[in-house]
Image (tube, helix red, strand yellow):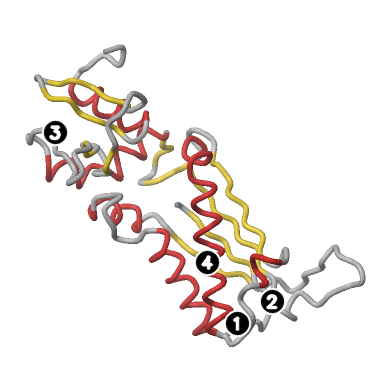
Amino acid sequence: MLLIDVFVPRGALSEEERQALGRRLIDTLMVEDDSHAIEILDAQRTITQVLLHEPTTWVLGQRPAQDPADPPRYLVRVTVPASWRKEMCEHIVDIVTDVLTETERSAGREPGRLRREPHAVILVEGISEGGIGIQGRAMSSLDLTELLSRPYRDQTSGGPGPRTAQGGLIDPICGMGVDLDDSTLTLFHEGVLYGFCHGLCRRAFADEHGLSLSR
């Protein structure tokens, strides 16, 4: 995630509640589990920002006219690289809805309405290739993969292809566990089989080691 815009009706949340919502979004979307290496999550955090907005005017389309603050409506826009969008959409929508539900529960409101009524709209938008600028330069998806994975790769380079406790492979670029089956993206390098969670990770590994992707 690069940018998370959260629109809430003016006065619906206190400053403390807004801060808690922003922090909860980051912590939940980047939960420290076995899916990615901690170095990758820390790198993602450095480029992730949450902005909370309180529009001066908010008009709902439904009839009869409704007050968007009673109960509070939410509009959340999450921007990610376009090449990541498709596989992340369902995951992001589910997690963001859970976080908003917890915000409502903490405020003493009925949280179930966010999954029952259209009171929380989440838009996952993909930024086109080259449309992200970091460190003074436009970055492709591969450039971004390189930036985020470099701390982990520097720490683990030179070791054999690691395996998970279940016998799967660990992506050498991002540290994600990969189940080994007929659909797994793999490469052989110096007699070792490596598995990858995404084509970008496979390409980054191939570029770094001078391997052909046709192998």
| Mark 3 / mark 2, whichever is N-terminal | 2
| Mark 1 / mark 3, whichever is N-terminal | 1
List the residue tagged with mark 4. 98
| Residue at image point 69% right, 76% down | 72
List the residue tagged with mark 1. 13
| Mark 2 / mark 1, whichever is N-terminal | 1
| Residue at image point 28% right, 29% down | 204
- Residue 39 placement (x, y as % from top left): 23, 53
Distance in Å between CA atoms under marks 1 and 3: 48 Å
| Mark 4 / mark 1, whichever is N-terminal | 1
Type of the residue with mark 4: Asp
Type of the residue with mark 2: Pro
Quarter of the image with the C terminus is: top left
Give the side of residue 36 with respect to residue 62, left or right. Answer: left
In contact (CB < 8 Å): disc 2 and disc 1: yes
User: Badge 3, how many Cα within 10 Å: few under 14, some, many 20+?
Assistant: some
Distance in Å between CA atoms under marks 4 and 3: 36 Å
In contact (CB < 8 Å): disc 4 and disc 2: no
* Whether residue 178 is situated above or below residue 205 in the rendered picture: below
User: Badge 1, how many Cα within 10 Å: few under 14, some, many 20+?
Assistant: some
Type of the residue with mark 3: Gly
* Whether residue 79 is situated above or below residue 137 in the rendered picture: below
Q: Nearer the viewer, mark 2 or mark 1?
A: 2
Q: Nearer the viewer, mark 4 or mark 2?
A: 4
List the residue tagged with mark 2. 72
Distance in Å between CA atoms under marks 3 and 2: 49 Å
- Residue 31 placement (x, y as % from top left): 35, 61
The residue lying toward the viewer, choosing from 127 and 97, is 97
Q: Which residue is the extreme one toward the right?
A: 64
| Residue at image point 59% right, 56% down | 77
List the residue tagged with mark 3. 161
Q: Quadrant of residue 155?
A: top left
